[in-house]
Amino acid sequence: MTGILGHNYIAGRRSVAGDIRLQSLDATTGEALPGHFIQATEAEVAAAAEAAAAAFPLYSKLDPLRRAEFLDAIATEIDALGDDFVATVCRETALPAARIQGERGRTSGQLRLFATVLRRGDFHGARIDRALPERTPLPRPDLRQCRLGVGPVAVFGASNFPLAFSTAGGDTASALAAGCPVVFKAHSGHMATAEWVADAIIRAAEKTGMPKGVFNMIFGGGVGEILLKHPSIQAVGFTGSLKGGRALCDMAAARAQPIPVFAEMSSVNPVIVLPGALKARGATVAKELAGSVVLGCGQFCTNPGLIIGIRSAEFSEFVAGLADAIGAQPAQTMLNAGTLRSYASGVALLKGHAKVTHLAGNEQAGNQAQPQLFKADVSMLLEGDHLLQEEVFGPTSIVVEVADHAELARALQSMHGQLTATLIADEQDLDDFADLVPLLERKAGRLLLNGYPTGVEVCDAMVHGGPYPATSDARGTSVGTLAIDRFLRPVCYQNYPDRLLPAALQNANPLGILRLVDGVSSREAIV
Amino acid sequence: MTGILGHNYIAGRRSVAGDIRLQSLDATTGEALPGHFIQATEAEVAAAAEAAAAAFPLYSKLDPLRRAEFLDAIATEIDALGDDFVATVCRETALPAARIQGERGRTSGQLRLFATVLRRGDFHGARIDRALPERTPLPRPDLRQCRLGVGPVAVFGASNFPLAFSTAGGDTASALAAGCPVVFKAHSGHMATAEWVADAIIRAAEKTGMPKGVFNMIFGGGVGEILLKHPSIQAVGFTGSLKGGRALCDMAAARAQPIPVFAEMSSVNPVIVLPGALKARGATVAKELAGSVVLGCGQFCTNPGLIIGIRSAEFSEFVAGLADAIGAQPAQTMLNAGTLRSYASGVALLKGHAKVTHLAGNEQAGNQAQPQLFKADVSMLLEGDHLLQEEVFGPTSIVVEVADHAELARALQSMHGQLTATLIADEQDLDDFADLVPLLERKAGRLLLNGYPTGVEVCDAMVHGGPYPATSDARGTSVGTLAIDRFLRPVCYQNYPDRLLPAALQNANPLGILRLVDGVSSREAIV
């Protein structure tokens, strides 16, 4: 932890006005790590929001290619964080080094992908309707539309991806790409990690000449609430629990000026194993699915928490195989003590429910999470029991057996919104159960076939979002390039001369981007 | 009013279960018009929401070309509504026949424009990232994204555009285009008009074979709140007052499942008259601006409610000319008695304020609205006085004189969010005051130059939206084709076979639309 100062970052400088000292814990031992982090004072939180607001006019109007350079520079700085950094993240999160090295690459790759989006230029949403001076009864003026950043964005990072969904993660990357300065609330679970990454961002900002205040970071408990309520903040990105996300949504909605919150919260990610696939490869699916359930100690938003199949000898055999596979998995250390407590209480609730049977897993005790498998009566789904609708964060899953195709459809219909919904199916299953697809489309942001939901590709086509409570706004995604849309708003220019228009809308099309001109997509200049 | 039954419309049928009878009033005389409208019962409101939900799976998955036929058919039916219909609208709203005829054409044109959008196909937002089976360390699966309707939409129409922002107005048209069935809460100010238009929609739905429940309509006071709280409703479109819109937003945010509300509410639409333009054509601008202020009795969301200029002899002369022009305007009948009461109380508040001077206008009394012009001290803007930030709906405007360029910038900076912001400027002004443009971009959804905000073109590039309180979500527009985006959400398909994908994502590109394929825009088939 050499060099950790534990200061807040405001307008490109370190700030330490408060006297509440916080410590980061070793996730494996629970011991306090050396060094302190100083909780931001109310004045510092306000100063961070105001620094972002002060940077916004300049930053949002920068040539998008300059913002791309900034994102690329952050990526370079993050790639350069070496073994000391990885060791720090591992100590704070108990995640293995290989995983952190992979996540480092995912994080820098994500930043570079947003730089590509800025160069590609479709994010501008450029639309031009040329003047029709001869139109009767009224002429049409020249009208041009493009999208600009909404303003300063508050980002609340997740504990489970200390890099890819945290300080320089997808929310930060997409907000910065959109031209929105960020105030990042450091996660208490990895404050030293956050400082390393914030330093990397600040170095990149200095090297590429970004305005002070383009990125700010505050430490502390309760400071997030103050941040969200600051009038300069115009949107919020959050990844975490349903309780935490909903609380932020409620506070944002109650502001004098309500602001949008993009919260990615709770999903049980149903996996439906269909009869043909079960017959052909039930044993393999059981092993693979067990691997997905316990991957990263089950600490994924897309962890498969519900496994549904139709009653049959093959399904019983599959469930027995799944129970064997999960029962054979070792205990793992969770991200922090709070996460373990939540897991233990979630497991206890399931164990204590009259309609839930425990199928596999050692007694949940001690300092690690024991993988578990349960079976729940389908009536719990059909009757809307909350226990099956809200994720138990950790290496556990619940099997539900349905009587037939019709009951399967009813069970899926009864589910709340999801990040993912997966079909394990062979060709005949797809013919027989094609009616499930439109149903799943209404329930989830991503539909998988013969895969497992725990891998989330960062690309143009990804949707890491979905109807409530998976997220607070099904129209957004927090992974993939479409994430930039959350932080953009359209602006229309009527009868403006070329020199006052954004480059995206100028006659000559200096950016060379695709634009909708009089209803036709075109890269042509306007003459 | 021949043929008016006053029944609710649920699932394509008329429904009348309640016993609360409402009457529509003649806007000019205040007399009750013949016939009754039966307030929907709670059960009927629920039935309407459920009918929309029942229609959603089929309607949202219809070939978009079928939805385009439906929109075109509504347009045809609305164009065919004849003189009896126009007379009905005129009686209910006191708007002149020529205006209603024009608005009829605007309404049918808007529906046809959304049909064009459906045929053009960019609303699909199709994105394809092809599988990379050889990628290391992990292969990439095939990922494809397009956008689907969010679900049933509740629409609350505006009083001031009984056609274009009401029953078959922009919110209804964009929701139907997006594949979302609609439950329309009829405005109490034009219930007979609403029935005529609902009949037209139902005829079009029948002629084009749309599912029952694609459009539903309910009458009554308080039924909107019940509707918004129904779990089937997934989004809300609203045009009206800040108070009404904010109340809906608060209720939507407090639902077990919060839903987005797109409320277009309050804007004072500042017009900044710059020195060069004043010198060159101050007198003309004064006359034109007066015309914009009193157009349609000032009952436009984009009515110029604030006129700002820099102290000078020319500005004083301009203000005198504006006062003369507004003072010479006749009184006009407003949409209804409630609107007139609000106008009178807004005018009285201005008259009673110590920092506001009355420049022109007859005493506000009687059954009509008297055009008024006021002048307010710039300190009211700088100190955030609410009186200058919230629109007085009607034929009135407020002049603010600033000392210089710097104070002008400060005054604009102090303004809340706006639908529009207008510069009246000559070439030299644009050089001298170019710094105002980025400031106005942050404040408004549409920036006009040398025009008046009261005309809102329906086209691809229009933005009729803006930061709060102009709307509840600056990322939307309620006029123009981008309005469809409000009611769409992205869905991603991972590793899905062609036959289960939406047509927009199939390999052969059967719709012939532009898609983002591996980061490149293309109409090519995937091979």
Image (tube, coloured by chain):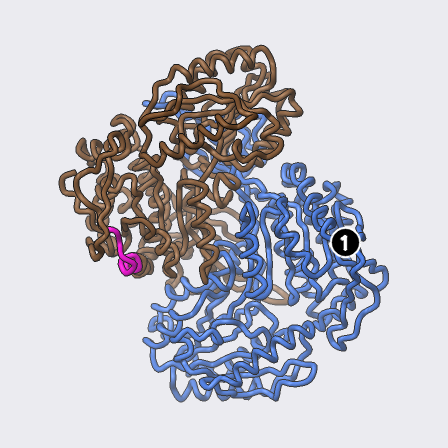
Chain colours: A blue, B brown
* Type of secondary structure dominating the magenta stretch: helix
Give the left or right position of residue B414, taking residue B471 as reference: right
Give the left or right position of residue A366, taking residue B20 as reference: right
Task: In the rendered view, tell whether residue A290 sits above or below residue B55.
Answer: below
Task: In the rendered view, tell whether residue B26 sits above or below residue A384.
Answer: above
Q: Amino acid at mark 1?
A: Asn
Residue B508 visible (yes or no): no
Q: Nearer the viewer, residue B450 or B251?
A: B251
- The percent coordinates of residue A339 (x first, y second) are 64, 73
Residue under the image location 36 percent in, 72 percent down: A409
Residue under the image location 43 percent in, 64 percent down: A443
Q: Identify the element where label 1 is drawn.
A: strand
**Chain at numbered mark 1:** A
Quarter of the N terminus of chain B within the rendering: top left
Quarter of the C terminus of chain B within the rendering: bottom left
Task: In the rendered view, tell whether residue A110 sits above or below residue A278.
Answer: above
Quadrant of res B119: top left
- The percent coordinates of residue A330 (x first, y second) are 65, 84
- The percent coordinates of residue B32 (x first, y second) are 21, 38
Give the left or right position of residue B351, taking residue B117 as reference: right
* Residue B527 belongs to magenta span: no
- The percent coordinates of residue B523 (x first, y second) are 44, 47
Which residue lies under the disc numbered 1? A8
Give the left or right position of residue B40, taking residue A129 as reference: left
* Residue B41 belongs to magenta span: yes
Q: Nearer the viewer, residue B47 or B342?
A: B342
Quadrant of res A224: bottom right
Q: From this viewpoint, which residue is outermost toward the right? A: A2
Residue under the image location 51 percent in, 54 percent down: A476
Please report the bounds of the magenta region as a residue range: B39-47
